[in-house]
Image (cartoon, rainbow, N blue to C red):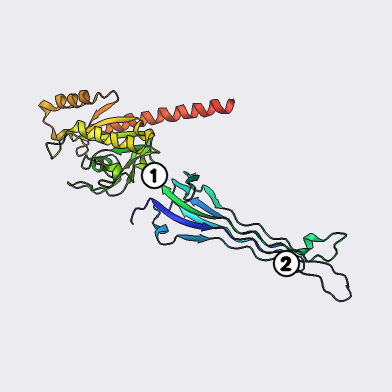
Amino acid sequence: MKFVDEAKIKVMAGGGGNGCLSFRREKFIPFGGPDGGDGGDGGDVYLIADQQVNTLIDFRYQRHFKAERGEHGRGRLCSGARGEDLIIKVPIGTEAWDDDTDELIGDLTEAGQKLMVAKGGWHGLGNARYKSSINRAPRQTSNGTPGEERNLRLEMKLLADIGLLGLPNAGKSTFISQVSAAQPKVANYPFTTLYPNLGVVTLKDVRSFVIADVPGLVEGAADGAGLGIQFLRHLTRTRLLLHLVDMAPADVKQDPVESVQTINHELERYSDALGSQEQWLVLNKMDLVPEDIREELCQEVIDRLGWKGKVYRISGQSGEGCDALCEDVMAYLEQIREQEQQSATDDSKE
């Protein structure tokens, strides 16, 4: 299935039904009076997050959605039926934007979460509503109001705890296949990964976290080079970024330090928040670096970058250092979750 993470659709809620103009006509009842019923309300349009939906590709083929209109009122004080609501299933992690005003309508981050994106029209009133002591036979009714119409932009953002960064061929797909059950395509050429992959990393004590692998970035990605930055939105929900660096590039002219600086520059151009997010430096493919120069080479990269954060030396191919990295990531996530729970507890007490 093709991975699609953005789509534009038009939604139209149902219009309200019109009120009815009617009078009671029965034998031996000369003054039956008005008995026109009200119309029904129009159906609303909702988005609902569904675990069974993984992409927005369906919206490439169907772009217009309309809820049912409310029925018109009838005689004998019969009200029209309400229009049926329209439920549109979207993947978990979908944001709904008003494409005309660029307003964020809502964010669906949990399974079963529901969001109204278009309100149905109100019902019209029948002539029975206008009966009074001085107006015994009203011929006045009202029409239902139109339903709300909206042009929506749906943006899907994967829900992951950890995001992987790196140039093409940095070994991100190999790493995620080593630490999780995910099986992304792995090959010795750039841009093997064409769309984001998710993997669940499960430790020996059954603790787990979700890791996201996005296509590699190149210099000028913000201007559309390579695959551009269209997939960087999937990293905005992550709590930690692992920056993988190829320490044994096939092209000897490729400098690991420049690789890190290139990626971080593109992140800052995309978003200040993403550029300042917590990053750990992961020096990959250490099994291809001769042991006698391994430590010296790593230290040179760290010193030239002026890196103050955490640094790990791993091999995604052999698994060297991967377990220790995953244990530290899990500990970091648990610490963040404890802080969030404590903060929520303090806020509830206030």
Q: Residue at 37% across / 42% down in the picture?
A: 233
Residue 316 in view here: yes
Between circles 2 and 1, the one closer to the viewer is 2
Instruction: Indicate which disc, 2 or 1, sits on the residue closer to the N terminus.
Output: 2
Rendered view: 292 above or below 198: above
SS for callout 1: loop
88 horizontally vs 68: left or right: left
Q: Residue at 50% across / 27% down in the picture?
A: 343
Where residue 88 appears, as percent x and y from the top left, is 49, 56
160 horizontally vs 312: left or right: right
In this view, the residue in front, 5 or 184, is: 5
SS for callout 2: loop
In this view, the residue in front, 240 or 198, is: 240
In this view, the residue in front, 145 or 168, is: 145
Question: How many numbered circles does the render carry?
Answer: 2
Q: Which picture quadrant has residue 56?
A: bottom left
Q: Which picture quadrant has residue 285?
A: top left
Where residue 256 appears, as percent x and y from the top left, is 19, 33
In this view, the residue in front, 349 or 80, is: 80
Q: Which mark is residue 4?
A: none
Rendered view: 200 above or below 141: above
Quadrant in the picture for the C terminus: top right
Rendered view: 40 above or below 276: below
Residue that numbered label 1 is attached to: 158
Q: Residue at 42% across / 58% down in the picture?
A: 59
Type of amino acid at the residue the image marks with label 2: Cys
Q: Which mark is residue 20?
A: 2
Type of amino acid at the residue the image marks with label 1: Leu
Mark 2 vs mark 1, CA separation in Å: 50 Å
